[in-house]
Amino acid sequence: MMIYGPRLADYRGQGLRVMGKRLDSSGLVVMSEIVRPQGAVPIPVDWRLSVCDGLYKVSDIVIDGISMAATQRSEFGQMIQRNGGRVESLLAIMRQRR
């Protein structure tokens, strides 16, 4: 099961540069890039924000074109499928990993 923190920890010690923002159909997108050492090509990162209770909250992180929310949905679907289509099994796994 994917969790954003450990995936983002791979980039520890590297800089993050905010490039701008734009509105799209799902809300606000903050465009940034991970600045890598020794002149390596920066990695684009989009932070998708949605309004919840009057506050902006991160609803998805898209790293180099890969949506973390879509990846997580796919992983959840696979877990449910492997366990006979039972959502309860996914919930049990999630409770164990808290």
Image (cartoon, rainbow, N blue to C red):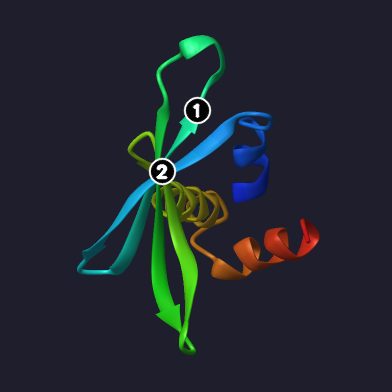
**Mark 2 packing: few (<14 Cα in 10 Å), some, or many (20+)?**
some
Read off the residue under disc 1.
35
Mark 1 belongs to which amino acid?
Answer: Val
Q: In which quarter of the image is residue 38?
A: top right
Residue at far bottom of view: 53
- Quadrant containing the C terminus in the rendered view: bottom right
Picture residue at 52% right of the left edge, 39% below the top: 16
Point out residue 27 in the picture as x, y percentages from the top left corner: 30, 70
Point out residue 87 in the picture as x, y percentages from the top left corner: 55, 68
Q: Is residue 56 visible?
A: yes
Point out residue 92 in the picture as x, y percentages from the top left corner: 71, 65
Mark 2 belongs to which amino acid?
Answer: Ser
Horizontal side of 72 relative to 50 (left or right) equals: right
Horizontal side of 49 relative to 35 (left or right) equals: left
> Gap in Å between the C-alphas at discs 2 and 1?
9 Å
Read off the residue under disc 2.
32
Point out residue 52 in the picture as x, y percentages from the top left corner: 46, 83
Picture residue at 39% right of the left edge, 73% below the top: 50
